[in-house]
Image (cartoon, rainbow, N blue to C red):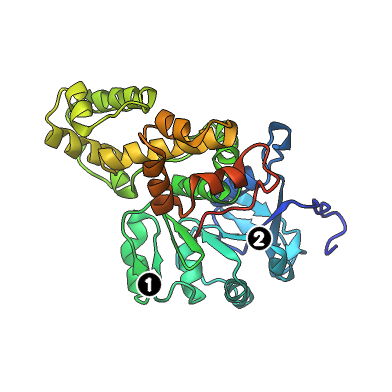
Amino acid sequence: MEQGDAPRERRNAYRVALVAFPGVRAFDVSVITEVWGTDRTDRDAPAFDLRRVAPETATPVPMRGGLSLLPDRTLSWLPRADLILVPGLDDHVTPAPPPVLQALRRAHARGTTIAALCGGAFTLAQAGLLDGRRAITHWNLVDLLRARHPEVTVVPDALFIEDDNIWTAAGTAAGIDLCLHLVRRSHGAEAAATIARSMVTAPFRTGTQAQFIEHATPHTDRDADALAAVREHALRHLHEPLTVADLAARAGMSPRTFARHFTAATGTTPLRWLLDQRLAAAQKLLERTDLPMPEVARRAGFGSEVTMRQHFASRLATSPRAYRAAFSAGSATAGSSPIAR
């Protein structure tokens, strides 16, 4: 133990490191702590062991607003972590301590998954970990990231993105999206949904951060209300062969107008949104039931097991059977993800 009053490590828990140094954002620290630092094993959520890691443990890490964070492990604990998280920064050009940058480089070389929330991408860029790789940050910081780190391929509108086992997320709430996605990736959709329900947030959001970039305020909310009603209808009828034309007719729009308004409102196309919902429905059925594959495919709206298998392969890099083997309630291997990076 590095500190006398530090909590004891939980056996067989998924080990998560929150890397802290002066200037990290309190909001991102709170998100990470809420997702991985709360014990929800009484609701069948996975056991996590979250550690606050810094160059030293004796000095609290100051944050904006008079807050501080007391580390409970030094950087020497990082080789034990299954996942390393870097919060965003209050000042996005804050230089990270050299020991932190060195530790992050070593962790990536070991193959440890690393994720940065919001402006945490600047820290990874300082470490050289984003050179030649795709990354994202808050839409208002995209130009700054490009200017300061031209070696990075900045993707302007994603909510989160992965490249070579390094994850980055857009601003603020997108950090929640990324954290829940990382839970879903390692422990399954039901585990992520359990945590999301506890946080009173959506298990996942579709689309990109383009939907949040500043635009002129619409003159009316009528179209938004119609689109929301269409999405609710679609979720109740996923097992039916829905088409864009069907949804457009329900919204009282032409298919072309409907697609344009839908993409502006959600950041994704109607077909992509439907596919996301059907994949989520199939994942839940695979985790919660022992229904045969053709019935799972029918209920999720894929029509056939072959079609469902094709979409699992293209979007999740696994098969429905492998997903069930890893994440079903009775699986002995639950928690070991078959989903490729």
Placement of 247 over or under 340, stated as above or below? above
| Label 1 or label 2, whichever comes before in sequence order | 2
Is residue 27 visible to us here? no
Indicate the quadrant where residue 53 lies. bottom right
Residue 177 locus on image (x, y percent): 47, 46
The residues tagged by marks 1 and 2 sit, at their Cα atoms, a distance apart of 25 Å
Q: Are marks 1 and 2 in contact (CB under 8 Å)?
A: no
Q: In the rendering, which numbered label is found on residue 82? A: 2
Tag in front: 1 or 2: 2
Within 10 angstroms of label 1, few (less than 14), some, or many (20 or more) residues? many
Kind of residue sitting beneath label 2: Asp
User: In what quadrant of the picture does the N terminus appear?
Assistant: bottom right
Residue under numbered circle 1: 152
Kind of residue sitting beneath label 1: Val
In the foreground, 148 or 7: 7
Residue 73 locus on image (x, y percent): 75, 62
Is residue 161 visible to us here? yes
In the rendered structure, the answer to whether residue 135 lies left or right of residue 51 reads left
In the rendered structure, the answer to whether residue 183 lies left or right of residue 122 reads right
- At a point 59% along the width and 76% down the height, the residue shown is 109
In the foreground, 161 or 337: 337
Q: Determine the secondary structure under disc 2.
A: loop
In the foreground, 239 or 99: 239
Residue 142 locus on image (x, y percent): 34, 62
Indicate the quadrant where residue 103 lies. bottom right
In the rendered structure, the answer to whether residue 15 lies left or right of residue 254 reads right
- At a point 68% along the width and 41% down the height, the residue shown is 38
Q: Residue furthest right?
A: 4
Q: Determine the secondary structure under disc 1.
A: loop
